[in-house]
Image (cartoon, rainbow, N blue to C red):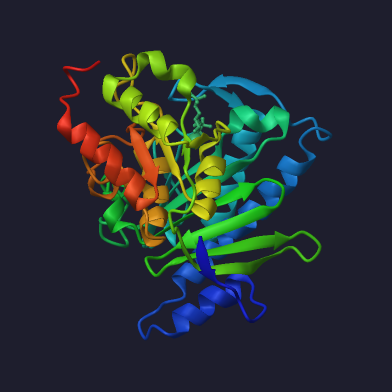
Amino acid sequence: MTSQTPDRLSTVTQFILERERDRPNATGDFTALLNAIALAGKRISHDVNRAGIADIIGLTGETNIQDEQVQKLDMIANTQLERALAPTGLVCAIGSEEEDEPVQLENGENGRYVVLYDPLDGSSNIDVGAPIGTIFSIYKRKTPVGSTSNSLEDMLQPGRDLAASGYMIYGSSTMLAYTTGEGVHLFTLDPEIGEFILTNSDLKDDGGAKVYSANEGHSLTWDKVDLEWVSQLKEEGYSSRYIGSLVADFHRNLLRGGIFAYPGNSAAPNGKLRLLYEAAPLAFIMEQAGGSATDGKRRILDIQPTELHQRTPLYIGSASEVERIIKMRAHTSTTATR
Ligand code: AHM
Ligand code: MG
């Protein structure tokens, strides 16, 4: 990773405000939206840190639309984000991994944006204290401002049209990374003063590390190309690092280099990860940092979603690593290999 080491003290709010000031037509919307998301992140971070002692570990007893068991903290994180975004008046609707359908926000008719999120990614790791995170996307709405949002039309947009995306990771420290298409900027929460402080601006993935992150426990269900690819990496002396929390695996690879993969498999040809809540927002960040992301054939940011909770295979990381798997997959017919 390369980045500019900040020569001054700046909170996330100051940083975004400064950037907006450089743009003559800036409305201040991003400052308000990212502030709201950062506020929710501080509350979620607080809850995650106290989960064991606050009796908020465990399941709610419900399953979400993806048939996954919902953790109490999934619901808490989902609510914190909605509660922080609603008062901005800037958001007409939200889409969440934990909500079956788009949620129209009260008084949101004049909101110019839709926000989509995975409120607590990697939530199966909550009980064991491993890093988890929030992933978010912001799109400009397509339906006219002032009307009731046809949320699906507003939300089913390809990642290349993202206005901003980012994530917050709740790990050994709480960090926030975001991009609006002008580089990737990273902030660390100072818990004493409750502010996200700029720690790296304009992060660049320099492809440094020979690391791959994939759940090889599923490899018997992978096709031959993925198996060959991983064998090749092993022969070349790569290390494997897999936490099972996408945001944590992604964050480590963004800082150190490497590739994360969640391929399709014989039971689930599109894999597990969600295009709108996970793949597209992280692909926008990775591309802004100089890396890339593919489903094996297509650039993730070019995929036109057709469903809110659509899944996609994902290979994301340093550009040369992603290029290698694209080439391997192009040279072998997938149907002939599984
Ligand atoms: P979640 O959003 O419900 O937490 O599920 C997504 C998570 C990712 O964070 C992680 O990369 C993946 O599921 C792990 O899946 P597996 O246990 O199959 O390796
Ligand atoms: Mg997730």
For the residue pair 175 and 68, the one nearer the viewer reads as 175
Residue 66 seen in render: yes
At x 81%, y 35%, the residue is 54
| Residue 48 percent location from the top left of the image | 71, 41
| Residue 32 percent location from the top left of the image | 52, 68
At x 53%, y 52%, the residue is 256
| Residue 192 percent location from the top left of the image | 81, 62
At x 17%, y 27%, the residue is 332
- Give the mark count: 0
Q: Is residue 167 left or right of residue 59?
A: left
| Residue 69 percent location from the top left of the image | 56, 21
At x 40%, y 54%, the residue is 286
Q: Is residue 17 left or right of residue 61?
A: left
Residue 11 higher or lower than 303, as above or below: below
Residue 100 seen in render: no
For the residue pair 258 and 122, the one nearer the viewer reads as 258
Residue 278 higher or lower than 310, as above or below: below
